[in-house]
Amino acid sequence: MKKFILKITAAGAIVASLAYCSTAKKITTTAVSLKDAYKNDFLIGTALNTPQIEERDPKAAALIPVQFNAVTPENCMKAENIHPQWDQYTFDLSDKLVAYAAKHNIKVNGHTLIWHSQLPQFARRIKDVDSFKTFFTNHINTVASRYKGKVFSWDVVNEALNEDGTMRKSIFLDKIGDGFVTEAFRLAEKASPGTELYYNDYNNEQPKKREGCIALVKKVQAAGVRIDGVGIQGHWHLGRVPFKDIEESILAYHALGLKVMITELDIEMLPRNFQGADVNQRQASNPALNPYANGIPDSLLQQQAADYANLFKLFLKHKDKITRVTFWGVNDGQSWLNGWPIPGRTNYPLLFDRAFNPKPAYHAVMALKK
């Protein structure tokens, strides 16, 4: 069995430790789940890949409905997958996601209507501005209206800002201008009037990018267009979680009348030479940058547990402002951080290990509710 011990440091930080007995057995379920423990605080979500949506993995199929009450599709609702040709949409997998969620009484966050990355090739080849605007309008109208009343929320626009808070030089900015964000929210509101509408980005807890995000939100609001919340992705690093910046951002976004979501949470365990979560950035492969291919030291798992516990302490402090906390993946083996920014690495960023067993971080997060 496993004995779980919590220690409170002099600074008030929670440190989690596990004592392992020689007769230890793997645990795949717990008496109380994440979603149950936090049911009076905020939704607990996860990102789903194709096998999980189709319930092809028995362990995932057993764990997800027990632990989570919100889901976000990793890829199936992104434009390159759902809208591969000008006059062709492929809704099979996204329809399955919606049906899966209805079956298990889980809320769906649609991800994402407008994003400069993972666009279909035909859209990138459009030269005429009016034709591109037609693509933009048709895409939002078609996708958002199809899932009207079936998805709880949409990430309407994803990652439109640079690190300094200025607008990213994307195809949308080039073809439509800096009003494309406002127009996306206007169209989404019309196509799906009962759905919550969010702007989503990474590093928008950092001061400069936060200010740019605030300016962007104010521009949407000034146009009389509805925006319900801001998603802080939460791709953070072991031992370097920016707690002060996160809290200041929660307060700043809430002051605008917005809901706050933590939308893509993970705590990266491996080194890399840059911050952020820009999928276009890459780093050269080096064995030294994949130090835990055969297993990770328990001391690092305990540090991760402390980071997650302190994050959730902060989230609980502001539970009146935060409506959802979503992990970017169900278990470590699924995480995008195994393949980005360096392919083929072995990362450990989530609460469940590759066998779907709860890690020290899981127990630390659960212990806050005991």
Image (cartoon, rainbow, N blue to C red):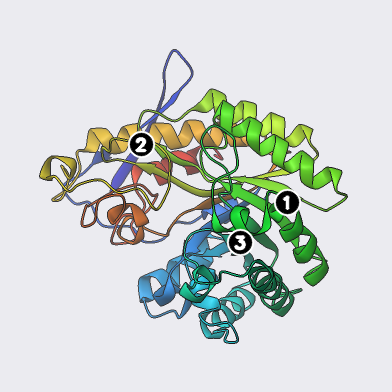
Q: Secondary structure at mark 3?
A: strand
Q: Nearer the viewer, residue 177 or 367?
A: 177
Q: Nearer the viewer, mark 3 or mark 1?
A: 1
Q: Nearer the viewer, mark 3 or mark 2?
A: 3
Residue in view at x 56 percent, y 63 percent:
71
Q: Is residue 317 visible?
A: no
Where does label 3 land, which residue? 114
Q: Which mark is residue 179?
A: 1
- The quarter of the picture where residue 305 lies is top left
Question: Is disc 2 surrounded by few (<14), some (14 to 19) or many (20+) residues within 10 Å?
Answer: many
Q: Residue furthest top?
A: 10
Where does label 2 land, which residue? 304
Relative height, residue 292 to residue 69 (above, below): above
Q: Amino acid at mark 3?
A: Ile
Relative height, residue 101 to residue 231 (above, below): below
Residue in view at x 36 percent, y 76 percent:
57
